[in-house]
Amino acid sequence: NILRDVSLCSSKGEIYFWTCDDEIQQEKYYEEISEVDTEEWEQLELEGWGGTSFIPVFEKIKGLQKQEKVIDCLIYLTDGYGDFPDEEPNYPVYFILSEGKKQPHWPDWIHYISLNM
């Protein structure tokens, strides 16, 4: 549903998708939002399920920024438990939780949305 909503707002802009536990397991890249195939994502089988660390995704984004990619926002679908980077990124970070609330150990720069499903 997030993909559908984003594509309704704009057809321009790059999107990077990663599945991650304690390392990045899968990667997908779309040069334009309009290229996103939501049916493909409905069939996605998640891999991993090891310990959780948010750090690999933030490191991946640092690498993209070194390549002069502009990162407008990070949307993280998560249960909220894991390791965080030590420094605040220069873009907004949103955690989307299937259920739950902000955890006390989260950095102040994490915004969150709880979906009571």
Image (tube, rainbow, N blue to C red):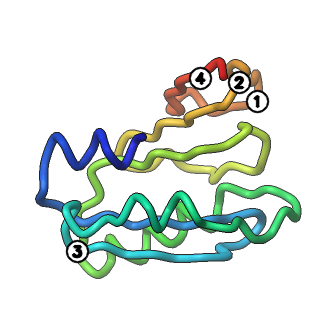
Residue 91: x and y in percent read 35, 46
Q: Quadrant of residue 20?
A: bottom right
The image's mark for residue 105 is 1
- Identify the disc placed on residue 3: none
Residue at 47% in and 68% down = 40
Rendered residue at 19%/62% (across/down): 34
First in sequence: mark 3 vs mark 1: 3
Mark positioned earlier in the residue sequence (1 or 4): 1
Amino acid type at image mark 3: Glu
Q: Residue 82: image x %, image y %?
A: 78, 47
Horizontal relation, residue 31 to residue 40: left or right? left
Q: Residue at x 63, y 50 (%)?
A: 86
What residue did someone put label 4 on?
115
User: Pointers 4 and 2 in contact (CB under 8 A)?
Assistant: yes
Mark 4 vs 2, N-terminal side: 2
Label 1 sits on what residue type?
His
Q: Which mark is residue 99?
A: 2
Q: Which residue is mark 3?
A: 31
The image position of residue 78, as x and y in percent, is 67, 43
